[in-house]
Amino acid sequence: FPRPKEVPRDYTPGPKPHVFEIKDARVGPMICFEALYPWLARDLVKSGATVLLNVSNDAWFLKTAAATQHIEQARLRAIELRRYLIRNAGTGISAVVDPTGAYSSEKLPIFTSGIVRGEIFPLEIKTPYALWGDWPVVAGSLGLIGFYFWRKKQSPQ
């Protein structure tokens, strides 16, 4: 996915992803929809994040499937980067997701007050996605396209 070249005028990007030290963990924060973009989470891990945090307010989704889709998309960041993900949504859905994508806590449903408890372990593993990003997929796709045209050229017509 291409990165946006321009940031809207009412936003100012920081110079680099910021990771917070909390006890033995280096926490990489993603605010709301930032968890939808794999390269943002990857940049946090490249900056040293051992745990991912997604803080959101899904109230504007009301009681639609969008809140569930939002947490599921954030959950993908835990899987592709092998990090625990803490998801704190002011109006739900909140949960702790382990590096395999399993919920290691009960999910707090949307519009429900409560506390989510779960264990996390800071991890420093480097997955292929953390190391290389989208390049293997891009290279593989270009290879397949090249192979298709090569085969097409080789076959008698």
Image (spheres, rainbow, N blue to C red):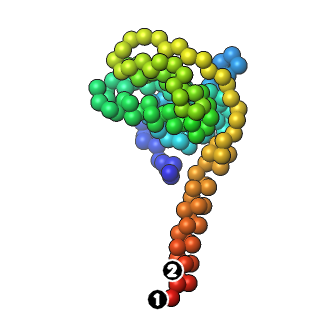
User: Residue at horizontal 60%, vertical 17%?
Assistant: 119
Estimate the x, y position of residue 100 in percent, counting from the top left: 58, 33
Which amino acid type is shown beneath numbered disc 2? Answer: Lys
Q: Which mark is residue 8?
A: none
Q: Secondary structure at mark 2?
A: helix
Q: Position of residue 134 (x, y in %)?
A: 58, 51
Report whether 128 appears left or right of 38: right
The answer to whether residue 115 is seen in the rendering is yes
Tell me the amino acid under the disc marked 1. Gln
Q: Position of residue 121 (x, y in %)?
A: 66, 22
Most foreground residue, 101 or 5? 101
Q: Which residue is mark 2?
A: 152
Res 20 seen here:
no
Question: Extreme left residue here?
Answer: 63
Check disc 1 and report the residue beneath it: 157
Secondary structure beneath disc 1?
loop
The crowd level at tag 2 (other Cα within 10 Å; few <14, some 14-19, many 20+) is few
Q: Residue furthest top?
A: 114
User: Which image quarter: residue 8?
Assistant: top left
Q: Position of residue 54 (x, y in %)?
A: 50, 27
Q: CA distance from mark 1 to mark 2?
A: 9 Å
| Residue at 51% across, 19% down | 105
Question: Label 1 crowding class (10 Å Cα cut-off): few <14, some 14-19, many 20+?
Answer: few
Which residue is found at the position 57% from the left and 72% from the top? 147
- Residue at the extreme front: 156
Q: Is residue 19 above or below residue 46?
A: above
Figure check: 112 above or below 39: above
Q: Residue at x 58, y 40 (%)?
A: 80
Earlier in the chain: of badge 1 and badge 2, it is 2
Would residue 73 appear left or right of 64 to someone viewing this image? right
